[in-house]
Image (cartoon, rainbow, N blue to C red):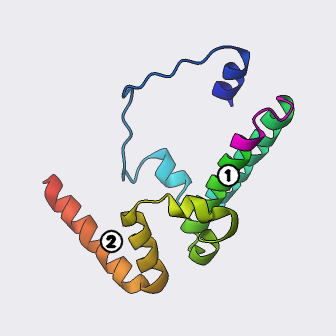
Amino acid sequence: PLVINLSLLGSVHYMDELMSAYRVGDGGSWTANYFSNIEKKKKHLEEIGHMLDEVNQYTNYRFEDVIMRTKSRNQFHLLLEQGKYQEAKTGEFIEFYNNLGNKRKIIIFLNQYSPAIAGFLKIIKRKWFRWALK
């Protein structure tokens, strides 16, 4: 919200440089703990949606298209996390699905049609990753 508000008050400069690092797969991180529960993540995305609606109204709907697209994209990723793959591949979400990379599409396919194999591959990947870090 702060960045959006400040950008509405003045110019924004985009710097195409790495400025920070993000720990991926760190089980003790705030993000991992907070979003481990799908209901918490769903509530968080609803709050973001409400905030974006307020920004939309405040700006007299000047950014309607990008706000609606952002809300749809968030909903698409939530559907994937909930395992609602068929719903994520249809309607307003088909464009987001089509823009996914082949690797992600294969993972979705395995989760949808062969969850046992997908689970087995996740275990192998985790074990390999731990071994590679040693």
In the image: residue 23, left or right of residue 48: left
The picture places residue 97, in percent across and down from the top left corner, at: 54, 64
Q: Any magenta on residue 24?
A: no
Whole-percent x and y of residue 110? 41, 79
Is residue 26 or residue 17 the one in the foreground?
17
Task: Look at the picture and state if 121 lies above or below 41.
Answer: below
Disc 2 from disc 1: Cα separation = 26 Å
- The residue located at (69%, 31%) in the rendering is 1
Query: Is residue 51 shown left or right of residue 81?
Result: right
* Residue 75 placement: quadrant: bottom right
Instruction: Say if 51 sits above or below 38 in the image.
Output: above
- Can you tell which quarter of the image residue 121 is in? bottom left
Q: Residue at x 64, y 74 (%)?
A: 87
- Amino acid type at circle 2 is Lys
Whether residue 107 is visible, yes or no, is yes
Q: Regarding mark 2 in the picture, which secondary structure is present there?
A: helix
Residue appearing at x 38%, y 85% in the figure: 116
Q: Which mark is residue 11?
A: none
Going by the numbered disc 1, the residue's amino acid type is: Leu
The rendered magenta stretch, by its main secondary structure, is classed as loop
Residue that numbered label 2 is attached to: 122
How many marks overall?
Answer: 2
Q: Residue 61's spot in the image, x, y percent? A: 83, 35
> Which residues, given as a range, are shown in magenta?
59-66
Element type at marker 1? helix
Give the residue at mark 1.
Answer: 45
